[in-house]
Image: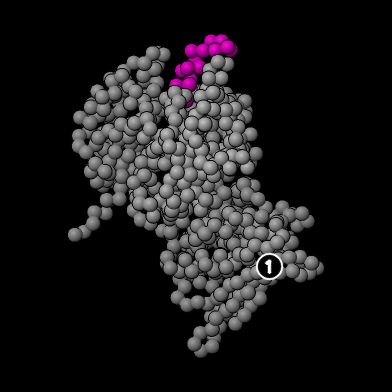
Amino acid sequence: MVENVSDHLYAIVDMGSNGIRFSITDLAAPTTRSLPTIYQSRLGISLYDAQYSRGQQVPIPPDVIDTIISALKDFKRTSLDFDVPQKADHVRILATEATRNAVNSQDFISAIEKALGEPWRVKLLKKEDEGKIGALGVVSSVGGSGGLEGLVMDLGGGSTQLTWVIARPGEPLQTSRIGSTSFPYGAAAMTQLLSELHTDKDRANLHAKMVQQFRDTFDELELSQSLLNKAKQRGLTLYLSGGGFRGWGYLLMSSHRIRPYPIPIINGFSVSVKDFKDTANVSNIAVDSLQSEIGVFRVSKRRAAQVPAVSYLVDALIEAIPVIHEVRFCQGGVREGWLFDGLPNEVRAMDPLEAASGRFATDAESARKLATLIAASLPKDCDVLDRRVPAAIREKHLLSSFANLMYLQQGHSKESAAVNALHVPITGVLASTHGVGHCERALLSLMLCQRWGGAGELPAPHGELRSRVELLLTQQEVWWARYLGVIGWTLGRVYPAAKIKEERVKISTRWAEGLGKKGNMQGVVMDLSVNKDAQGELLLGKDVLRELVEDIEAIGKKKNRVGGRDYGFGVPVRVHCHW
């Protein structure tokens, strides 16, 4: 029996309070973990506004229902164009609070189901299920070996949910025994609520009420012991999802110290709590965007108008929970959470970057061997703290992803290879990969760019973009990313077809004293062993080998320090060849 090639496609409708999102996701292996979206669209109807436009709740109006049904029919036709199986487990309309609390909720749902027919049914999420699915959406948006550990907050149109989550790869999800707590403080609901307050005393009373509610909830959630310890030692990370928070994130991105910010993706964008709670700054940007013809990237006029409401929420939240020290914005929501919840545990444990990049490997087994060689080029930790290889550089999934992508620009001319490589994780083929942080994107971007020549091969304005990408990282991270890029270039010369049919080289590295021009520095010594064939011939020509050694040692020279030759960071490198 021939397997239906479309059995891995899923059509999901997220019928939220602030808008209705339609998407088709391809869960085929090997990219399943990154939840690849192959189609998406949005209907800009706020079910919350439709019910509260005059202050008092009214039924969802017939014209709004008709518009939604028309859009759903269009999406159903689109799903047929993509060959999505018309089965109950492949098509799903997920409805949240605005539908759940509607006066005519059942009539609204019945009208949709009658118009679309089987198997298109509305799944009305309970309040506690909405919080759980939303939290899973956030979990799906975070990769890396550390997983996710902190507070999770989802800001919808009508409500906001708060809980804590610990999600480590390969381990069961941990969260509060009470699930998540919901508050009637969604972006649209807060906007409406604030419009009804006419005195400073009323506003002060609301603020005090919200602070107390958040404090009480923080206690009731009963954080795990590991989170309590983390809160005392260095503070907690707050993971945010929902359109209102994403708008806040884009406003912060527009005023970031690095301008223009080099990665135009909200998922994985992080800020300190100091920047996050600077509500005056964000509010001023929003006011300017409302008066501007262009506005702020990805912030609609409607979102900008909701900023005072979100600002009110942020002020109360940070006052109530002062142990928050970092904030990370996430793209994951109900759609992603629903899909992620259905994945097998072994797939959920995979890293999304490694999974997404795997399809670009010319040969999977050779890519694994290349990743092993790349890892071998990193020396073990030394006693000198600033000489240690940063943890982010050692991440297995980063090295594997680099190995998978090393040959992607093989057919490009010299004029475009480094440029194209620089953009791969930012606006290129991995831009849509779900679950990748900005540090990972920046590191991979620099590694791939250096693999094809680095700054010397970048025409304007791409060199300036590379500089802004580097500013997202520490000097140590930038130098080691460049170093690995040179290692990638070296291995690309040794194995030009991206296939390891014979073991041509072995690599080992160690820290050693006595390096540098004056012999007074600690640096990396690489032992590069070249194998011979059955006839005793070297598997790598000596001229090529000499060139490769020069390239590797050059990255450790003073002129290639990150931050300047006199005060910047760099590590001397010496290569010993053996055969």
Could you say where residue 494 lies in the image, as x and y percent from the top left?
54, 73
Could you say where residue 391 lies in the image, as x and y percent from the top left?
60, 55
Could you say where residue 487 lies in the image, as x and y percent from the top left?
59, 66
The span shown in magenta is 187-202
Q: Nearer the viewer, residue 100 or 431?
A: 100
The three-letter code of the residue at mark 1 reads: Trp
Considering the numbered disc 1 on the image, is that residue within a helix, a strand or a loop?
strand
Look at 47% across and 17% down and name the residue there. 193
Identify the image quadrant of residue 357. bottom left
Q: In this image, 8 relative to 202: left or right?
A: left
Q: Residue furthest bottom?
A: 535
Q: Label 1 belongs to which residue?
A: 511
On screen, residue 477 above or below 287 = below
> Badge 1: few (under 14), some or many (20 or more) residues near its Cα, within 10 Å?
some
Magenta-drawn stretch contains 194? yes
Q: Nearer the viewer, residue 90 or 207?
A: 207
Magenta-drawn stretch contains 548? no
Q: In this image, 333 relative to 100: left or right?
A: right
On screen, residue 194 above or below 130 = above
Identify the image quadrant of residue 42. top left
Could you say where residue 446 lies in the image, as x and y percent from the top left?
58, 55
| Residue 353 visible in the snapshot | yes
Q: In this image, 347 relative to 238: left or right?
A: left
Quadrant holding the C terminus:
bottom right
Magenta stretch secondary structure, dominant: helix
Look at 58% across and 61% down and name the residue there. 485
Identify the image quadrant of residue 366. bottom left
On screen, residue 304 above or below 234 = above
Look at 23% across and 43% down and name the residue there. 87
Look at 74% across and 61% down and name the residue there. 558
Q: Residue furthest top?
A: 199
| Residue 259 visible in the snapshot | no
